[in-house]
Image (spheres, rainbow, N blue to C red):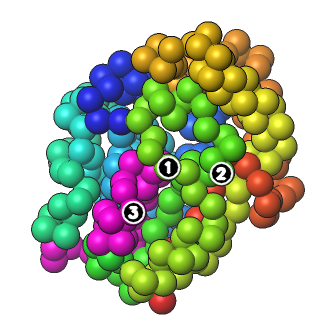
């Protein structure tokens, strides 16, 4: 998404409100609590931190050792507005960034979708090198190509994933999946219908690719809260689901 200033501006404004971001942030926090309990002094790196919404959420939850890196100057500037000392860094150069520092947690949300087949293995190896022995990599990813739509075009996504992709890639980097689930399973029929309609509009020429808009917009308050509570209830009642527009994984060293 580097170079798409308007998308970063929307993200910065809406991350604390939009149902999808709120749901994702809570999933990440639950992963941290499961691994480290009540500790708030764990060292956390958000690799591809965007405008800092995840870091801001964790700061409000009491986590004290927070660091971020991102390849977008726009994103880093927004992080600085939030008061975070975030470093501008192309993630393909992660191996050379503070190589002696390791982390209890590395968060990498909706980042791998911007990397090619050639770039992913060395990135995953670099991420593993930065994890402590009992550390975890927490990653959300765009899932299933059937969910491709205007959002992918608007933010520059180059690929989507299924679990089998990570089951193949991660062991090569010395990593193992501790937990994985697709989400939002309950909302997936609605999301799928919207995305298929978007693709039809593009195919028929009713919508131009250069005019594509992302999903980062705030619906009416009652719709936003309803969607949030549906996602929250799904997370509580269904620990794993087989389908959804996102794939959430928790990874450790093998």
Give the residue drawn at x 63%, y 56%.
Answer: 247
Give the residue drawn at x 43%, y 32%.
Answer: 155
**Residue 15 can be seen in this image:** no
Number of numbered discs on residues: 3
Give percent across and percent down for residue 81.
26, 28
**Residue 144 can be seen in this image:** yes
Give the residue drawn at x 57%, y 57%.
Answer: 161
Helix, strand or loop status at disc 2: loop
The label on residue 159 is: 1
Is residue 26 positioned above or below 238 on the image?
A: above
**Is 109 part of what is drawn in magenta?**
yes
Name the residue that disc number 3 marks: 117
Q: Nearer the viewer, residue 33 or 39?
A: 33
Is residue 150 positioned above or below 57 on the image?
A: above
Residue that lies at the very extreme toward the bottom in this rendered image? 254
Residue that lies at the very extreme toward the front in this rendered image? 204
Q: CA distance from mark 1 to mark 3?
A: 10 Å
Give percent across and percent down for residue 149.
60, 31
Helix, strand or loop status at disc 3: loop
The crowd level at tag 3 (other Cα within 10 Å; few <14, some 14-19, many 20+) is few
Name the residue that disc number 2 marks: 144
Direction from residue 60 to residue 51 in the image, left or right: left
N-term-proximal mark, 1 vs 2: 2
Magenta residue span: 98-124
Give percent across and percent down for residue 233.
82, 46
Give percent across and percent down for residue 70.
27, 46
């Amino acid at each position: 998404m580097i170079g798409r200033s308007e998308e970063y501006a929307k993200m910065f404004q809406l991350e604390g409100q939009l149902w999808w971001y709120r749901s994702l942030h809570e999933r990440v926090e639950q992963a941290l609590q499961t691994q480290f309990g009540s500790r708030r002094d764990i060292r956390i790196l958000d690799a591809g931190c965007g405008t800092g919404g995840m870091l801001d959420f964790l700061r409000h939850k009491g986590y004290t050792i927070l660091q971020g890196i991102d390849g977008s100057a726009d994103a880093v500037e927004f992080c600085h507005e939030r008061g975070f000392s975030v470093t501008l860094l192309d993630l393909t150069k992660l191996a050379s960034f503070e190589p002696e520092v390791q982390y209890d947690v590395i968060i990498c949300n909706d980042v791998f979708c911007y990397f090619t087949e050639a770039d992913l293995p060395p990135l995953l190896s670099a991420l593993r090198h930065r994890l402590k022995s009992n550390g975890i990599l927490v990653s959300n990813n765009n899932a299933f190509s059937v969910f491709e739509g205007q959002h992918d075009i608007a933010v520059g996504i180059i690929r989507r994933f299924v679990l089998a992709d990570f089951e193949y890639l991660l062991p090569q980097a010395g990593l193992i999946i501790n937990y994985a689930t697709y989400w939002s399973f309950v909302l997936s029929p609605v999301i799928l219908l919207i995305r298929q309609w978007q693709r039809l509009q593009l195919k028929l020429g009713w919508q131009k690719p250069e005019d594509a808009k992302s999903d980062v917009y705030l619906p009416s308050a009652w719709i936003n809260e309803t969607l949030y509570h549906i996602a929250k209830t799904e997370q509580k009642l269904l620990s794993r689901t087989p389908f959804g527009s996102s794939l959430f994984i928790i990874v450790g060293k093998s």
